[in-house]
Amino acid sequence: MQRHMPIGYRLVDGKIVIDSGKAEVVQKIFRDYLNGASLIAIAKELTTAGFPNANNKPSWNHGSVGRILENTKYLGDSMYPQIIDKGTFELVQQQRKSKNKKLARTPEINTRKNQSIFTSKLKCGECGEIYRKYIEHAGRPSEKSNWKCKRYVYQNRVHCRNLFLTGKDIENVFIPATNKVLSRMWMLDKEKKRKPTKMTVEIKNIEERIKELEDEKRFSSKELAELIFKRAKAYYSISTIDDYDYKTKKMKEELLDKEPLTEFDEELFLNIVKEITIYKDGKIQVEYINGIIVEEEHGIRKGE
C-alpha cells in the first residue's frame, strides 16, 4: 500500500500517469525558483493559494518545496513519466548549490551523480526520523561520511543514539536481503490480504446526517450538498492507493533472470527498494516497493 506519491502523478488502472493540473504547479515551482523566488516565498504562495501538499494539506514550508526541487522522479524513470526536463532540473540543482555555498551549507542533493541514492530511503526505527548524510573533514584527505539519524544531534544535544552507517554498510545490507527475495520468488506470488477502509467517527456522523436529510427528502438543501462534499473529502483523507499488484509485477520484471548479487546494483536498488529501517540493536529491515520486508543483522556502531 502506498499512501502518497509525488505531487503531479496519479494512479490509473494500475499505472502511474501525469496529473496535468498538479504537474503544472510542479513545473511552476521549478520556474519560479530559477527566476529568483526563494523557497519560503514559493511556500507562502502555495499555502495562500490553498494548493495541497504531499499530505493533502494546504500548508507548505521551505522544506516541502525543497523536496520537490530535488526529487529525481520528475526526470522520469521506468515507473514515473517525465514532468521536468533534465536541463531545467540541473539548472535548479546548480542554483541551489550556489545559494547553499554562500550560506556555508553542504547539502547532499538526491541525484545519482553524487551517489546520494539513499536519501529519503533510510528511516530511524527508534524515533521515526529520516537518516541524513553527514560529512566530516570535508575537502581534506581525512574526509569521511556517515549516515546518521536526523535527530542524532538536535539543538546542540544528542537526542538519538541509533547506528551510524556508511554507504558501504547499506550496500552490504541490500545485497543479502535481495538475494533472499531472489531465492524465494514464490513470495511475490502470495496474494495480499486487502484491508477494508475503516469508517472514522467523523464519516459515521456525516453518513448518519446525510441519511436523515434524505429520509426527510431534503435533496436540494444546501446542508446536504455540503455534507456530500465533506464526506468525499473525509474518505479521501483516509484512502490509500492499492498498487500492490502493479508493484509486485514491477519487482518481478526487475528480478527476472537475475543471478544472486555479488556486488551492489544501484539501478536495482532505486527501482525496488521503498525504505530501509534501522534499529540500534543492529536489526535492519529492507522494505521493497510492494511491501515485502526482509530483515538483516548489522554490526553495531552506535552514535556516541
Image (cartoon, grey):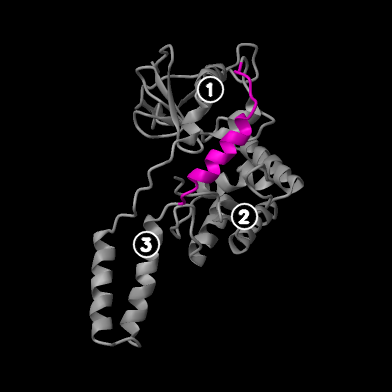
Q: Magenta stretch: residue 248 in it? A: yes
Residue beneath disc 1: 174
Looking at the image, is mark 1 or mark 3 earlier in the sequence?
1
In this view of the protein, can residue 108 be seen by the observer?
A: no
x then y, percent, for residue 188: 50, 34
CA distance separating discs 2 and 3:
22 Å
Q: Which mark is residue 30?
A: none
Residue beneath disc 3: 235
* Residue at image point 40% right, 26% down: 152
Q: Please, what secondary structure does the residue beneath circle 3 have?
A: helix
Q: Magenta stretch: residue 252 in it? A: yes
Residue beneath disc 2: 17
Label 3 amino acid?
Answer: Tyr
Quarter of the image with the C terminus is: top left
Residue 137 higher or lower than 257, as above or below: above
In this view of the protein, can residue 65 be seen by the observer?
A: yes
The magenta segment is 241-261
Q: Which one is in front, 179 or 18?
A: 179
Label 2 amino acid?
Answer: Val
Q: Which one is in front, 207 or 244?
A: 244
How busy is the neighbourhood of tag 2: few (under 14 within 10 Å), some, or many (20 plus)? some
Quarter of the image with the N terminus is: top left
CA distance separating discs 2 and 1:
29 Å
Q: Quadrant of residue 182?
A: top right
Q: Please, what secondary structure does the residue beneath circle 2 have?
A: strand
Looking at the image, is mark 2 or mark 1 earlier in the sequence?
2
Q: Is residue 235 left or right of residue 173?
A: left
Residue 153 higher or lower than 72, as above or below: above
* Residue at image point 66% right, 32% down: 112
**Outermost residue to the right:** 87
x then y, percent, for residue 199: 28, 59
